[in-house]
Image: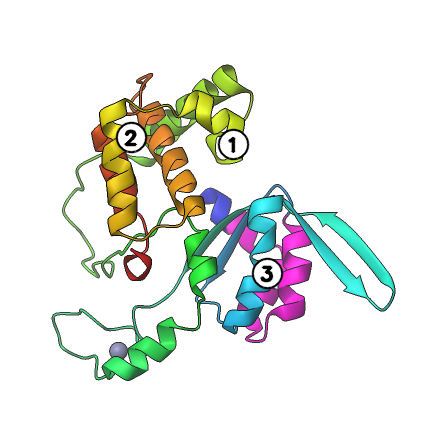
Amino acid sequence: MAVFSRVEKHRPFSALLQSRSTLNGLDRTIRAFYAHLLVAAGYETNPHECVRKACPFESGHIVISRARDRVSFPARFQLVAAMNPCPCGYMGEPSGRCRCTPEQVQRYRNKLSGPLLDRIDLHLTVARESTALNPAKQTGNDTASASALVADARDRQQQRQGCANAFLDLTGLRRHCELSKVDEGWLETACERLTLSLRAAHRLLKVARTLADLEQVESIMRHHLAEALQYRPATLG
Ligand SMILES: [Zn+2]
């Protein structure tokens, strides 16, 4: 969490959180966060703005047009965003406290457009944190060992292709994310069934490549593809 608290002190972060109409705020924030981590908690904007603003995800730059001027700024960043499951935030809680209707939930979720969600590689649902003062010790990796695994996986990517998996172009994707014929067929069938776009399929392959790197194996295998598929947003397939 150290990186989070460091980022929070930056002014553009607070500007994004405080502004409900983030059109200009997002411009400024994306420029200010070039090569940094952009953290947005529960930000809301209208779907058309989302489509327009989604372009830096792909291109790594943002174009600002004012009158006759048109300026391009570098805007390559990592976006981490969080939102509640429903307007009140208690949907799925065993207490049954949520009284939101399905229509209210749908309207709330529609504030994030499909094209924007499609460009976010990992979608995770997390349960509310326990309020126990002395919670039972969690199993699994602690932060230090998880961080070492990530650093190792990034090293593998740099040595293999000179960039992180997220920045592989089409040629790099074909060279470094090669699948066996059987797995290729399996993935094509899954993409057809879930009506995934070609862009989503490419992003999914990069996630699978990263999962293989985390396991320190050379080839992408079926279970990497299956896990990557689980991270697709449920509403988009
Ligand atoms: Zn609710």
**Image: magenta residue range:** 5-33
* Front disc: 1 or 3: 1
Mark 3 closeness class: few <14, some 14–19, many ≥20 residues within 10 Å = some
| In-image side of 77 versus 98 (left or right) | right
Q: Dot 2 corresponds to which residue?
A: 184
Judge left or right: residue 49 versus residue 31: left
- Where disc 1 sits, the SS reads helix
Q: Which mark is residue 53?
A: 3
- The image's mark for residue 170 is 1
The residue at 59%/54% (across/down) is 55
- Is residue 41 toward the left or the right of residue 11 in the image? left
Give the CA distance from mark 1 to mark 3: 23 Å
**Closest to the observer: 137 or 197?**
197
Checking the image for residue 30, the label placed there is none
Residue 102, by quadrant, is bottom left
Label 1 vs 3, first from the N-terminus: 3
Q: SS at mark 2?
A: helix
Q: Is residue 134 above or below residue 187?
A: below
Circles 3, 2 touching at the beta carbon (< 8 Å): no
Tell me the distance, in whole angstroms, between the alpha carbons under discs 3 and 2. 32 Å
